[in-house]
Every structure is written in structure tokens, then in C-alpha cells.
Image (cartoon, rainbow, N blue to C red):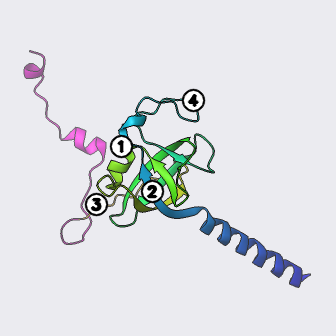
Amino acid sequence: MKKKITQLFVAVSLFITVTDCLAQQSGKASFYSNRFHGRKMSDGTSYHRDSLTCAHRTFPFGTMLEVINPKNNKKVIVKVTDRGPRYRSRVIDLSYAAAKKLGIVSQGVAQVEIREWVFNPFYQPLAIPFDSHGLFINVKSTAGVLQNLNIDKARVLK
């Protein structure tokens, strides 16, 4: 019984690791030329060069993808609205705006990493106030700030 539980645990762990690794793609990315501006895309919407959209072969329409340029660590989140790219050597076609945010417009084609982006409303980076010496700064509460706030009512009500 213990052996079967151990084997099941190893299999599940391996599956999770493999699926997490496969969820991230890397490859070449290009972007749409200006002549596609206003044309219909595969999902029925019109392409606009200033929107953050992309073309991908396998992800369903409406999927949000995080695209990362590993050379400069710039990131952009795009929505899959088209099928493509046309060339087999490329993984994704980006809109002009997305390519500009990633800094690949001058190159034309660049190496990128792609992963599915999932909105997490509970993620908030923890902001801990430190001074220049690495010590905590005394932070007043809202009530403390309002208590020390002096308002000249005559000047405000003029």
C-alpha cells in the first residue's frame, strides 16, 4: 500500500512539473505590418495596430498571454485574436503596439518566451517602507494624518 501511494505521489509530482514546463513556450516572434490595420482577424474583430493582440496557432481565442523579451526583460500581456504566424519558424505574431512595448520593432523578429497569463486579484506586492539606512519608517495611520491636518475653513469656503 505504501509503495502504491509513493508511486502515485511521484507520478503526480512529475506530471505537475512537466505540465508547468510545457506551459511556457519560447521561440521567435514577429509583428503585423501596417497593411493589416483595419482587416478582419480570425475571431471576427478588426486588427488595430495600437491594441495589444497576437496570433497563435494553438491557444484559444480570448486567451491572455504574457510575452517576455529575454534580452531586455520587458513584458507585455496580449490577447489571442488570430491564427498564425504564417511562417513555421515563428511561434507568435504580435500587434505593432505589443512589439513596441517589447522593444522588437527595430529587429523585426526576436526571441521571446510565452506563457498563459491568469489574472490573480489577490496578488498585491508587499510595500514595506524603509529609509535610506534600511530601517523601518514610522508610518502614520489615516486617522493620524487627518488629526494633524489644519484646514483654514474661511479660506476654503471663499
Label 3: state its secondary structure: loop
Q: Which residue is mark 4?
A: 44
Instruction: Note whether 77 is above or below 11 in the view shown.
Output: above
> Do residues under tags 2 and 3 come within 8 Å of each other at their CB atoms?
no
Query: What crowding class fits label 3: few (fewer than 14 Cα within 10 Å), some (14-19), or many (20 or more)?
Result: few
Q: Is residue 124 visible?
A: yes
Judging depth in this view, the residue of 1 and 145 nearest the camera is 1
Q: Residue at x 60, y 62 (%)?
A: 23
Label 2: state its secondary structure: strand
Label 4: state its secondary structure: loop
Residue type indicated by callout 4: Gly
Say whether residue 32 is magenta.
Answer: no
Q: Is residue 16 left or right of residue 134?
A: right
Residue type indicated by callout 1: Ala
For residue 97, the mark is 1
Q: Earlier in the sequence, mark 2 or mark 3?
A: 2
Q: Earlier in the sequence, mark 4 or mark 1?
A: 4
Q: Which residue is mark 3?
A: 129
Q: Which residue is mark 2?
A: 29
Q: Could you tell me how far apart the alpha carbons at marks 2 and 3 are, in whole angstroms?
A: 39 Å
For residue 71, the mark is none
Judging depth in this view, the residue of 50 and 151 nearest the camera is 50
Q: Is residue 49 visible?
A: no
Magenta-drawn stretch, dominant element (helix, strand or loop): loop
> Do residues under tags 4 and 1 come within 8 Å of each other at their CB atoms?
no
Picture coordinates of residue 89 (x, y %)? 52, 61
Query: What crowding class fits label 2: few (fewer than 14 Cα within 10 Å), some (14-19), or many (20 or more)?
Result: many
Q: Which residues are magenta?
A: 131-158
Instruction: Note whether 136 is above or below 84 in the view shown.
Output: below
Residue type indicated by callout 3: Pro
Residue sticking out furthest to the bottom: 3
